[in-house]
Every structure is written in structure tokens, then in C-alpha cells.
Image: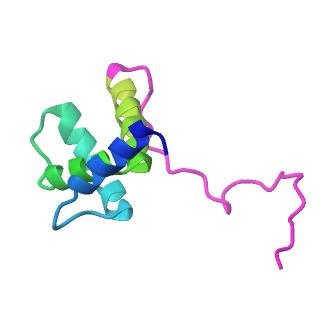
């Protein structure tokens, strides 16, 4: 571990709170948090907990940054919003040429 990684690690330890969100909870709250942040529609009620989690979790921070980027693109008209549901396995024709691999 290099000195920068060590410093980041120690800072994350000192940034912990008595009550924290886990990744599943934080990621489920991110869409509303980012919308509130970008729309100026108010502060998310759990903003402090979300921000604390983002300071400690690089995976959730990456998700946050990607979601923020997509919503900014959508707001600027660079990305058209869609009302369509994502295609499910049942609604797509089976054209895959891949051969399933058996698991032990």
C-alpha cells in the first residue's frame, strides 16, 4: 500500500458515522438524490448519509458519477428520455448463437 492509499484508507475510517447506509440502500437512493441535486428541487432527506457513503465507497461513487452524467445529458437534450421498458428475455427473440456452459 502506497502512502496515498494509506492516507485515503485512514481518512475513510475517520469519516465513519454511527449510522451508515450500505451499498444497496445507497444505490437505491441515488436516482432521487441526483435528481434533487440537479433540479435544485431541494435536498434529499438522507443527503448527509448518502454523501458520507460516497466518500467511503468508490463503487457507489462511480455509479453516482455515471448517473449524474446521464441525467445531465438527458436534461441538455443530448440523450432522449425513454418511456419504454427495457426488453426482457421473454420479449426478445432468441437469436443468440452462444452455447450455454454447464456449471458444476
Q: Position of residue 99 (x, y in %)?
A: 90, 60
Q: Residue at x 23, y 64 (%)?
A: 20
Percent position (x, y) of residue 53?
28, 53
Instruction: Locate the C terminus by quadrant.
Output: bottom right
- Residue 3 horizontal/vertical position (percent): 41, 38
The quadrant in which residue 61 appears is top left
Q: Is residue 15 left or right of residue 63?
A: left
Q: Is residue 80 magenta?
A: yes
- Which residue does the image show at 60% across and 52% down from the upper left? 87
Position of 75 compared to 88: left or right?
Answer: left
The image position of residue 37, as x and y in percent, is 19, 36
Camera-nearest residue between 5 and 26: 5
| Residue 76 in which image quadrant | top left
The residue depicted at 34 percent of the width and 27 percent of the height is 72
Q: Residue furthest bottom?
A: 104
- Is residue 95 left or right of 52 when viewed as pictured? right
The answer to whether residue 63 is above or below residue 13 is above
Q: How is the image coloured?
A: rainbow
Q: Specify whether 3 is left or right of 102.
A: left
Query: Is residue 8 magenta-colored?
Result: no
Residue at position x 44%, y 26% from top? 79
49 or 31, which lies in front? Answer: 49
**For the stretch drawn in magenta, what is the main secondary structure?**
loop
Identify which residue, 90 or 53, lies in the foreground: 53
Q: Which residues are magenta?
A: 76-104
Residue 39 image-quadrant placement: top left
Amino acid at each position: 500500500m502506497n502512502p496515498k492509499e494509506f492516507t485515503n484508507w485512514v481518512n475513510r475510517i475517520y469519516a465513519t458515522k454511527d449510522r451508515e447506509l450500505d451499498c444497496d440502500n445507497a444505490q437505491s437512493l441515488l436516482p432521487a438524490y441526483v435528481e434533487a441535486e440537479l433540479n435544485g428541487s431541494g435536498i434529499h432527506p438522507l443527503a448527509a448519509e448518502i454523501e458520507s457513503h460516497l466518500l467511503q465507497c468508490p463503487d457507489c461513487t462511480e455509479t453516482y458519477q455515471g448517473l449524474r452524467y446521464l441525467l445531465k445529458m438527458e436534461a441538455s437534450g443530448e440523450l432522449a428520455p425513454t418511456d419504454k421498458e427495457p426488453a426482457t428475455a421473454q420479449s426478445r427473440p432468441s437469436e443468440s448463437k452462444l452455447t450455454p456452459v454447464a456449471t458444476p
